[in-house]
Amino acid sequence: MLLTQKRILQILSTHNHNDLASKLCDLTLGVLILLNVMAVTLESVPQIGARFHLQFHYFEMLSISIFTIEYVTRIWVSTIDVKGKGNTNFKRRLSYLFSFTEIVDLISILPSILFMFNGLD
């Protein structure tokens, strides 16, 4: 079964406590954020960082991939969000892209994305 934009928006919307998929999405992203904080903290300990450098790198790549997919998906479904500003899909997406939370999300993932692509040289 393919999910529709409307259903994906419902799942990605926070505070939807009656929806199991939404709760699981919130929980998964929250746990992933906490695991990333723990990984960064542990990686800063020289002995642990040196020993598990490769595992931390792979975990960061996986995390950034998940967060990037979430970011792009939220932009995609923003066109049907009734709270979105604008009377065209482009204007609603643009409005969403420049919202505070999306700017924070972009600032959070962009350095890692750039680092991953910079490592491909």
Image (tube, helix red, strand yellow):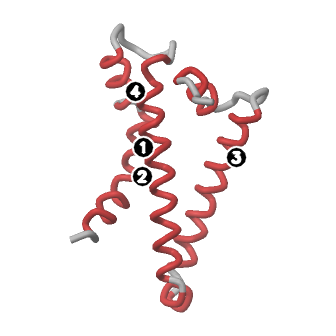
Give me the C-alpha separation between circle 2 and circle 3.
Answer: 19 Å
Residue 105 falls in which quadrant of the image? top left
Q: Amino acid at mark 1?
A: Val
What residue lies at 51% left-to-right and 51% top-to-bottom? Answer: 66
Q: CA distance from mark 1 to mark 3?
A: 20 Å
The disc label shown at residue 104, or none: 1
Question: In this figure, which residue is indicated by the disc labeled 2?
Answer: 108
* Spatial separation of the CA atoms under disc 4 and disc 2: 16 Å
| Badge 4 or badge 2: first in the primary sequence | 4
Q: Is residue 64 left or right of residue 10?
A: left
The secondary element bearing badge 2 is classed as helix
Q: Residues within 10 Å of mark 1 (few under 14, many from 20)?
A: few
Amino acid bearing label 2: Ser
Disc nearest the viewer among 4 and 1: 4
Q: Tell me the quarter of the picture where residue 15 sits.
A: top right
Which structural element holds mark 1? helix
Residue 77 vertical position relative to residue 88 in the rendered view, above or below: below
Residue sitting at x 42%, y 34%: 100
**Does the CB distance between marks 2 and 1 fall below 8 Å?**
yes
Residue on which the image places disc 3: 27
Secondary structure beneath disc 4? helix
Query: Label 3: how many residues lie within 10 Å, few (<14), some (14-19) or many (20+)?
Result: few
Q: Where is mark 4, residue-wise? A: 96
